[in-house]
């Protein structure tokens, strides 16, 4: 591992150790509208793993149907919240690029809202492919950037002020290139568009006050460049949040 990889890992684990409780509470309902269980066509008793599963809000959706539901995550504090909130999950501290799991062992390997923390998304998705059974599937879920490069750049500039442990949000087209480069074929895709408030995106319990202030200033000055469609709502801002789900299988 290079020095910069080590530095990034430290940044991610510090951020999620500090924010574990508040992050988990703030983001609890965000997968309700996506219905990832129906989308993934997972069958009763199958094994489901999530890489970067954190405090369990995503994989918990699969608990009533899966025979085994396991999280692999870098941050022990996030797994601690998962243990208390969703008993019954298997929890493993691990790096997404090196999963301590035999090849071909999971029916469904997922990652949700974590790829934008990772600098090597192709390697991570390839690792998901490795641990998936031949008959299994890979489900990739993440927020996405606009297709226009200027907007994507401005969105990511704003996002790095909000959370320096992020690497980048990629456009839907880039996400598709990533999964295909990792040796997967896309069998289904869904792009959801939701309205979100700045006050819900940055809870004071989770983010330092000066970062919230810096994000507000960026939105005032350059929000229109981000393609996020910011609009004032009283003392708050409302904007568009886009999430992509890609259901994939091993390329023939
Ligand atoms: C935004 S949280 C998402 C948690 C969960 N998937 C959810 O949506 O509620 C991102 C998680 O990815 C984990 N993470 C980031 N980089 C990782 C890596 N290289 N390997 C494993 N986990 C990682 C962090 O520790 C954090 O728990």
Image (tube, rainbow, N blue to C red):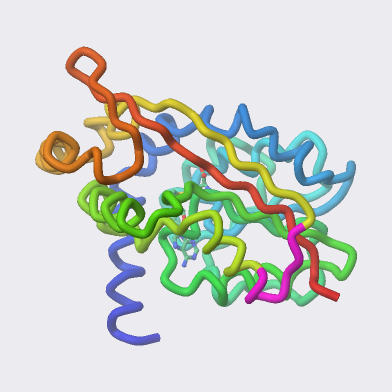
User: Residue 161 vs residue 132: left or right?
Assistant: left
- Occupied quadrant, residue 111: bottom right
Residue nearer the viewer, 50 or 198? 198
Residue 191 x/y as whole percent: 60, 41
Of 122 and 93, the residue lying toward us: 122
Residue 217 placed where, x, y %? 11, 38
Which x, y percent locates residue 199? Answer: 28, 25
Q: Residue at x 33, y 77 (%)?
A: 6
Please indicate whether residue 211 sits to the left or right of residue 122 in the image.
left
Residue 184 drawn in magenta: yes
**The quadrant where residue 126 appears:** bottom right
In the displayed orientation, state which residue is furthest to the bottom. 2
Q: Which residues are magenta?
A: 180-186
Q: Residue furthest top?
A: 234
Image quarter where the N terminus lies is: bottom left
User: Residue at horizontal 62%, vertical 28%?
Assistant: 33
**Can the viewer see residue 36?**
yes
Where residue 250 sits in the image (x, y, percent)?
80, 70
Nearest the viewer among 46 and 211 is 211
Count of numbered badges drawn on the protein: 0
From this view, report whether residue 216 is shown above or below residue 10: above
Picture residue at 71% right of the left edge, 75% below the top = 183
Identify the residue at horizontal 75%, vertical 39% (top origin): 37
């Amino acid at each position: 591992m290079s020095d910069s990889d080590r530095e990034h890992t430290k940044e991610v684990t510090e951020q999620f150790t500090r924010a574990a409780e508040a992050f988990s509470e703030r983001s609890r309902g965000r997968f309700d509208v996506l219905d990832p269980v129906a989308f993934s066509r997972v069958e009763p008793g199958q094994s489901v793993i999530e890489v970067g599963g954190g405090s369990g809000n995503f994989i918990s959706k699969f608990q009533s149907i899966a025979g085994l539901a396991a999280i692999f995550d870098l941050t022990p504090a996030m797994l601690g919240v998962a243990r208390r909130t969703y008993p019954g999950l298997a929890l493993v501290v691990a790096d997404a690029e090196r999963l301590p799991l035999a090849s071909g062992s999971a029916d469904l390997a997922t990652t949700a809202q974590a790829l934008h923390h990772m600098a090597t998304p192709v390697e991570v998705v390839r690792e998901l492919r490795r641990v998936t059974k031949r008959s299994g599937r890979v489900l990739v879920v993440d927020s996405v950037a606009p297709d226009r490069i200027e907007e994507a750049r401005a969105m990511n500039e704003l996002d790095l002020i909000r959370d320096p442990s992020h690497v980048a949000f990629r456009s839907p087209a880039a996400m598709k290139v990533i999964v295909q480069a990792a040796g997967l074929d896309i069998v289904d895709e869904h792009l959801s568009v939701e309205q979100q408030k700045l006050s819900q995106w940055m809870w004071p319990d989770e983010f330092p006050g000066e970062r919230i202030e810096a994000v507000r200033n960026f939105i005032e000055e350059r929000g229109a460049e981000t393609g996020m469609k910011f609009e004032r709502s009283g003392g708050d801002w409302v904007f568009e949040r886009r999430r992509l789900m890609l259901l994939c299988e091993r390329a023939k």
